[in-house]
Image (cartoon, rainbow, N blue to C red):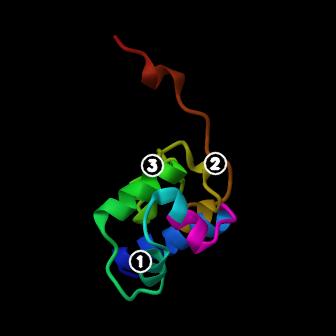
Amino acid sequence: MTYTQKVLEAMIQLRKDAGLRICDLAYELCIEANYLSKVELGRIRISMQLILMYYEYFGVSVDWMFGRTLFRDGHYIGERDFSKAPDRELFGYPAAPLPAPDASASEVS
């Protein structure tokens, strides 16, 4: 899947999750509904300006829109943070709980 397809899916998902019609979102973003409809149908290219409008309006990270993170707020899953992932096996890690971090490893000498 290309980044354009990922962004397009994210844009449609955000609009639908918010319960907005294309014309409602277009009004909120101060753009033409016809333009937004053509973008969602893949008839015209997605502009960076439109991506940034979605980022600001919906409060999601651009990384999430590009499929680079699992979470809409854009935070990355750290080594000991896999418990927050919706499906830990997605990353090839076992679903068993991870061991507690070693306290001595975080001490600074």
Between discs 1 and 3, the one toward the N terminus:
1
> x, y percentage for residue 38?
43, 83
- Label 2 with label 3: CB-CB less than 8 Å: no
Question: Dividing the image into 4 quarters, which one contains the C terminus?
Answer: top left
> x, y percentage for residue 41?
47, 86
Choose top left, top right, bottom left or bottom right for residue 48: bottom left
Asked if residue 104 is positioned above or below residue 99 in the image, the reply reads above
Asked if residue 14 is positioned above or below residue 78 in the image, the reply reads below
> x, y percentage for residue 28?
53, 57
Q: Considering the numbered disc 3 on the image, is that residue within a helix, a strand or a loop?
A: helix
In this rendering, would 74 be left or right of 15?
left
In the rendered image, the residue lying farthest to the top is 109
Read off the residue under disc 1. Answer: 35
- Write down the region rendered in magenta: 18-26
Nearer to us in this view, 66 or 77 = 66
Q: On residue 56, which mark appears? A: 3
In this rendering, would 63 be left or right of 97?
left
Q: Within 10 Å of the Cα at label 2, are there few (<14), some (14-19), or many (20+) other Cα atoms?
A: some
Q: Is residue 24 magenta?
A: yes
Question: Dividing the image into 4 quarters, which one contains the N terminus?
Answer: bottom left
Amino acid type of the residue tagged 1 in the rendering = Tyr
Q: Residue at x 44, y 53 (%)?
A: 55
Between discs 2 and 3, the one toward the N terminus:
3
Q: Residue at x 69, y 65 (%)?
A: 19
Read off the residue under disc 2. Answer: 83
- Label 2 with label 1: CB-CB less than 8 Å: no
* Cα–Cα span, label 2 and label 3: 28 Å
Is residue 62 among what the camera can see? yes
